Image: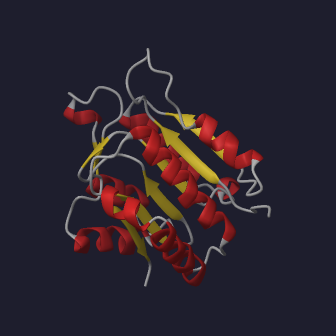
Amino acid sequence: MASANGVFCIEADWFGLAHPMSMKPVLDLLAGSDARIPFVLRDAATRAEIEFYLRRWLQARYRRYDILWMAIHTRPGELLPGDMRKPEERLGIDALEGLLQGKCRGRILHFSGCRYFKMPPSRVARFLRTTRALCVSGFTREVPWLEATIFEAYWLTLLSYEARTRKGVREAARLMRREQGPLCARYGFVIRVAG
């Protein structure tokens, strides 16, 4: 089954230059599988680079890549690219919400970082509403990198098999919870679909 839509992945350095961890092999696997998920992968070491690539992702020519995969270290409600000691490099959920406000209609945003959605459900709902995204997903707990990445690849595959509608994404979420329920619970996996 071929996917008409793809993934736009913005990835920051995971564990330093000596560790070659990357989402690239996973994206290559998804592109070469029966799911045939096309992708764009961009490295971002600074907040400015993240903001630059987000603006690019929102351009009409990248509309086909309707899933945004933010593969970046996080804290609750904060993206942490590059030097995490520098507060000016952090991108908080309020600033991200402002950047994406009203621009994500029909798009899906997934956050790989640990504990990104460790916040009140009402705050996640507001982010979903304000950005007008079709769906947001991510973790409320600390997750192991490799295992979580495999888990995420499965989530992206389910999304690729369903229509990019509320009904389709709800079905993907139902399948994820049914088939990966124990891991969803262990990782505190959050899936919020637009109402």
Picture coordinates of residue 63, whole percent (x, y): 66, 60
Picture coordinates of residue 61, whole percent (x, y): 70, 54
Q: Nearer the viewer, residue 4 or 1?
A: 1
Picture coordinates of residue 136, whole percent (x, y): 43, 65
Residue at image point 35% right, 28% down: 82
- Residue 188 appears in the rendering: no
The answer to whether 8 is drawn above or below residue 172 in the figure is: above
Asked whether, in this view, residue 121 is left or right of residue 154, the answer is: left
Viewport quadrant of the C terminus:
bottom left
Q: Image quadrant of residue 27?
A: top right
Residue at image point 79% right, 61% down: 2
Residue at image point 60% right, 66% down: 159
Residue ranking furthest to the top:
18
Asked whether, in this view, residue 5 is left or right of residue 112, the answer is: right
Viewport quadrant of the N terminus:
bottom right
Residue at image point 61% right, 52% down: 7
The answer to whether 124 is drawn above or below residue 117 in the figure is: below
Q: Nearer the viewer, residue 178 or 131?
A: 178
The answer to whether 127 is drawn above or below residue 116 in the figure is: below
- Residue 36 appears in the rendering: yes
Number of marks: 0
Q: Image quadrant of residue 87?
A: top left
Q: Which color scheme does this rendered protein use?
A: secondary structure
